[in-house]
Amino acid sequence: MMRELSVDLGEARSYPIYIGENILEDIVELFKRRGIPKGSPLLIVTDNLVAPHYLDRLTGLLETGGYKVLHTVVPAGEQSKSLEVFEQVITAALQGGLDRNSTIIALGGGVVGDLAGFSAASYMRGVRFVQIPTTVLAHDSSVGGKVAVNHRLAKNIIGAFHQPQMVVYDTATLKSLPEREVRAGLSEVVKHGLIWDREFVAWCGEHSEELLNLQQAALQHALYEGCRIKSLVVSQDERESGLRAVLNLGHTIGHALEAVAKYQELLHGEAISIGMVGAAILSVRMGNPEYIYTETKKLLQKFRLPVSIPEHMDTEAIMRAMMHDKKFKEGTMVFVIPADIGKVEIRGNIPADWVRETIEQLKKEA
Amino acid sequence: MMRELSVDLGEARSYPIYIGENILEDIVELFKRRGIPKGSPLLIVTDNLVAPHYLDRLTGLLETGGYKVLHTVVPAGEQSKSLEVFEQVITAALQGGLDRNSTIIALGGGVVGDLAGFSAASYMRGVRFVQIPTTVLAHDSSVGGKVAVNHRLAKNIIGAFHQPQMVVYDTATLKSLPEREVRAGLSEVVKHGLIWDREFVAWCGEHSEELLNLQQAALQHALYEGCRIKSLVVSQDERESGLRAVLNLGHTIGHALEAVAKYQELLHGEAISIGMVGAAILSVRMGNPEYIYTETKKLLQKFRLPVSIPEHMDTEAIMRAMMHDKKFKEGTMVFVIPADIGKVEIRGNIPADWVRETIEQLKKEA
């Protein structure tokens, strides 16, 4: 069974997301359906952890289907989202003779997606791009067309908006994920519920164990809903001028925690989990009902996600990291705040004192 | 007096080109007209040859107008169109605190325009971009939104389509250009006539001396017409899927000559001049009237532009360089061929033998 979802961005740039177990087997049929040309070489970008599992199989399937296939394998991890590794991908594309009709395929998680996506956006000023996510978290990055690499001074600062031709989400590939990565990925699924859909939040609460165990029917439903909500938001605000900012629920505090921990101690989804609890605390501080905080926290705990800041992290260091975050426009402090479960608002001018208090409280959460 | 031309690309991305002597003095008024925000810092990107002439003046004008202005000065020349220098520009942007409402300004010729433009396209996935060209050649690169840096294996291979907010063409700045650069820049002006407008070609022939002497009225008319023709073509084909290829008249052979000369011996406009004579030879070889060749050659000679290939250049090396040019789609040879003076066609499957004969003939032209 294959679920199909359309990310609607106007005729030229709309694209489908296919979700299903073992749908990698149908890759040639899907490529054909989307008109990926056979005359020009394809380049698969993947990492050294994913390659042993799926690279040969994907290459074999595509070659049997008549495609010329090249690949480049980068080291797993955030370090590969650099200009240096980006240049290596471009070199591989040039040496492999990729032309304007070529397609770059991201086989892996968010890092590979971002790296391959920015390569596809820039190579010859833009070639086709296909995403084959192999992580739960990548359900998030595979919708919306945001691609980027890091600069040593800031994450995701060098990038583009470049929509894929399609996303092929084979949920069987998630079985090779470490459990901690699964949990962290589900954090973004839950986030999509919290910003948009109270019913889906309730469903997540009831199905947390099935999701943590990668039970396929539940997993496919959750990924479908996560992608659906994100694509609804993105469709209405492709270039991130306003509405799209709601997707940053939990990210202001979360990014700061990641930065202070030097991207070592906390996975992105874990940091976002703590950040969502922080946003809920701020919400209650603003006068919203207490249950927004208690329900948010309880839900994240069901997914065995962290809801408190490790004590050793310095409050002022976290505050400073937040001030540098690119989401602060012209010096004002902006937060995405839950107005209810399944509903958020963007609030400007949140007093720094409230934020500091929230950080302190998060260090005491059990 | 200020001429104004609109590059029409649909509401969100259309932009004006302002052309006039000493219009740099009006920069604050023009920034205001285009709504360049004052709350976020501006970054001027320029090179070490242009900076001594105009950087302080431009900075002073903008600061007096209430803008916060930063700058980064890169070495003059094609070497600065690299990922390394691009990274330096991004570092300057980050260290200067540029945010999503900031504007990056290109003050200089085509290299600075391409480098600053790709930086503006990529920084935070895209910030505002303003071009202040200081060369004749930049009339060409300032229309169309093509921005890029080079890879050691290929020119302009890493880039984007990113339209400026406006182009401010102060023709007084051209007075600091070396004469050879003026001639080479006029080569692209003539090219625009040759692909689109027989009357403008005739006008160029009659006004070559005034143009070479930078007589202001003639220069402004020529730049206006060059920009107008290019913007007509670009408006109809922003993403370079078809029509826009006509702008590559002379570029297939021209790029190959530049590459074989390792970008040392021939300026871009000079290489294109020879390439346009080559395209005219191919046109006659295909059965078109002889005058296409004789008039093209005569016109370029009036501008004291080269019309022959330096004898020491190896024909086979030129042929090989052409085969690597990204304009060859899936191995076929495509040329832009004049069908008449002021009219071109895109022709596929030009026999390699004809091209080789043309190269040989170009080595014998006087």
Image (tube, coloured by chain):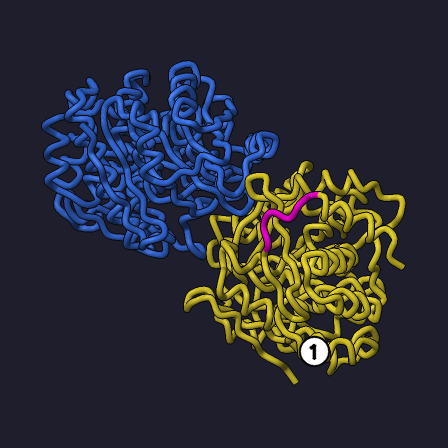
Chain colours: A blue, B yellow
Secondary structure that dominates the magenta span: loop
From the viewer's perspective, tell me whether residue B137 is left or right of residue B347. right
The picture places residue A67, in percent across and down from the top left corner, at 44, 28
From the viewer's perspective, tell me whether residue B128 is left or right of residue A354. right
Q: Quadrant of the C terminus of chain B?
A: bottom right
Which residue sits furthest front? B287
From the viewer's perspective, tell me whether residue B345 is left or right of residue B191. left
Which image quadrant is residue A109 in? top left
The picture places residue B216, in percent across and down from the top left corner, at 75, 80
What range is drawn magenta here?
A: B347-352
Q: Is residue A363 above or below residue B339?
A: above
Residue displayed at 49% across by 41% down: A101
Which residue position holds label 1? B220
From the viewer's perspective, tell me whether residue A365 is left or right of residue A149. left
The picture places residue B306, in percent across and down from the top left corner, at 84, 60
Residue displayed at 30% across by 49% down: A234
